Image: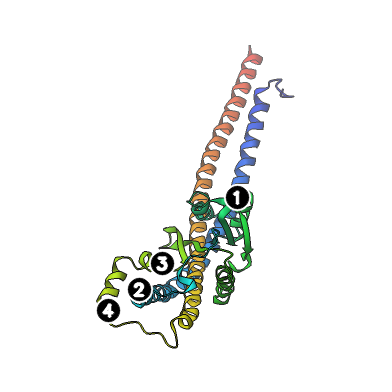
Amino acid sequence: MCPVCGKEGQVTVMASMRDIKRRRGSIQSTQQITKAMKLVSTVKLQKAKQRAEQSKEYFNCMYETVVSMLAKAGNINHPYLKAGDSSKKGIIVITSNRGLAGGYNSNVTKLITQGDFKKEDVEVYVIGKKGRETFQRRGYSIREDYSDIVEEPLYSDAMEVSRKVLDDFVNGEIGEIYLAYTGFKNTVVHVPTLLKLLPVEVADKTGKSGVEDAQKSVAPMNFEPEDDAALDLIIPKYVTSLIFGGLVESVASENGARMQAMDSATSNAEEMIDHLTLMYNRARQGSITQELTEIIAGANAISM
């Protein structure tokens, strides 16, 4: 109840105005944070995008060269070209260490959690804390954690991951190796991708164009010194290149996704601020109208 006029309306309006003002201030503070994060992501995106575009041709060339070479070589009995005895499937999953990136992390993990893989047959080589948290929460087996390399990936980091998964594959601890990452198409288009690394399946990887190229080539593929020695050298480089390519594209996709998410959050905050400002002005106008009405009513009562 108002101590001056003895009415509850004035106190209620003032309390409502304070609540609106407090909420608007809170949203304005959040908007400043989202604006700053958007600017940071934009700067990082330009750098990551340039790096991804510069390296993409090399990794595509490496991919096509190895596939074409194996298609022309015919049947070769090599451990990298046949599935292991183990039913385990090793999956290298590239996510991020931070959130606030829209569906970037969840879209990659869904390739495994909602795919055709049985949980008990999956061994996860996780890159990124968000992916690790998701798989731990869902009860998946995490074989290795390389989350420290995802911020600024180097080729040597990809070599370390490649060396571990290849050792596990050759030792029969896992029978197949996959790579789950987010492919970078452009600033707004990012494609969750699941790629089979080992065993190398020429028929699946060449596609129509690869088969045609192999058929057009009449020259046999000769290896020096021997095919086993050559593949022991080439396949690890091939796997390392694909892992590093996935890392580079994932970093660019992460920053692009975060920039979009923060831009959307900033726009939503602006709309909420405008709406709360309108509500505040209406409440303030109502308070002024109520005060004027009470003053006029009091003056009329005194004059009577």
Q: N-terminal of the two: label 4 or label 3?
A: 3
Please state which amino acid type lies under the numbered disc 1: Thr
Q: Quadrant of residue 125?
A: bottom right
Circle 3 — which element? loop
Residue 201 image label: 3
Label 2: how many residues lie within 10 Å, few (<14), some (14-19) or many (20+)?
many
Residue 217 image label: 4
Q: Front-most of 79 and 167?
A: 79
Mark 4 and mark 3: span between their CA atoms?
Answer: 19 Å
Circle 2 — which element? helix
Q: N-terminal of the two: label 2 or label 4?
A: 2
Whole-percent x and y of residue 256?
48, 60
Q: N-terminal of the two: label 1 or label 2?
A: 1
Label 1: how many residues lie within 10 Å, few (<14), some (14-19) or many (20+)?
some
Residue 251 image label: none
Please state which amino acid type lies under the numbered disc 2: Ala
Labels 2 & 4 near each other (Cβ < 8 A): no
Q: Quadrant of residue 294?
A: top right
Asked if one can make out residue 94 in the rendered structure from this viewpoint, the answer is no
Labels 4 & 3 near each other (Cβ < 8 A): no
* In the image: residue 4, left or right of residue 205: right
Mark 2 and mark 3: span between their CA atoms?
Answer: 9 Å
Labels 1 & 4 near each other (Cβ < 8 A): no
Whole-percent x and y of residue 264?
49, 50
Mark 1 and mark 2: span between their CA atoms?
Answer: 56 Å
Mark 2 and mark 4: span between their CA atoms?
Answer: 10 Å
* In the image: residue 125, left or right of residue 200: right
Residue 61 vertical position relative to residue 124 in the rendered view, above or below: below
Identify the residue under disc 2. Answer: 71
Residue 168 vertical position relative to residue 263 in the rendered view, above or below: below
